[in-house]
Amino acid sequence: MELLLIADPSEQKVRSYLSESRCFVASSDGVLVGACVVQPLGEDAYELMSIAVEPGRQKSGHGTALLKWVVDFFREEGAQRMEVGTGSFGHQLAFYQRQGFRVTRIDHDFFVKNYPEPIFEEGIQLVDMLRLTREYAGRPA
């Protein structure tokens, strides 16, 4: 839970989607360094609900390796697409785009309507959520 709260500061929201989801973890030298949660959206689509890496291990490739593994895992499961929602700026947006996710829509005022306390990143309040999608084509490399 501690790791997941790095990506989503609302424990209530995290708990609300855990029972319907699959959880994955990343470890390094036997130590848990990352976690993510993926929820089915339908027969052939999934949503990455949360992904986080221990702060002292961020920017060391663990998150990228975990996301690539999860993307390939669901491709092998027959998924046609994976979606994710994130803030409209910051390093998370670039992280997903580097892995082939593209912006497909905007959920206006998502963060102000769905969280009781304002969420700030880099000194700026999150307001809108960008929805990104990765369409699967072919098999993993």
Image (cartoon, helix red, strand yellow):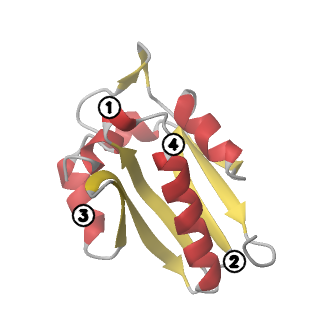
N-terminal of the two: label 3 or label 4?
3
Q: Which residue is mark 3?
A: 16
Q: Is residue 18 above or below residue 14?
A: below
The secondary element bearing badge 2 is classed as loop
Q: Is residue 133 left or right of residue 70?
A: right
Q: CA distance from mark 4 to mark 2?
A: 20 Å
Q: Residue 93: which quarter of the image?
A: top right
N-terminal of the two: label 2 or label 3?
3
Q: CA distance from mark 3 to mark 4?
A: 18 Å
**Residue 44: x %, y % from top left:** 61, 82
Q: Residue at x 43, y 67 (%)?
A: 38
Circle on res. 56: 1
- Which numbered mark, 1 or 2, is in the foreground of this view? 1
N-terminal of the two: label 1 or label 2?
1
Q: Are marks 4 and 1 in contact (CB under 8 Å)?
A: no
N-terminal of the two: label 4 or label 1?
1
N-terminal of the two: label 4 or label 2?
2
**Residue 124: x %, y % from top left:** 45, 16
Q: Which residue is mark 4?
A: 86
Q: Are marks 1 and 3 in contact (CB under 8 Å)?
A: no
The secondary element bearing badge 4 is classed as strand
Circle on res. 80: 2
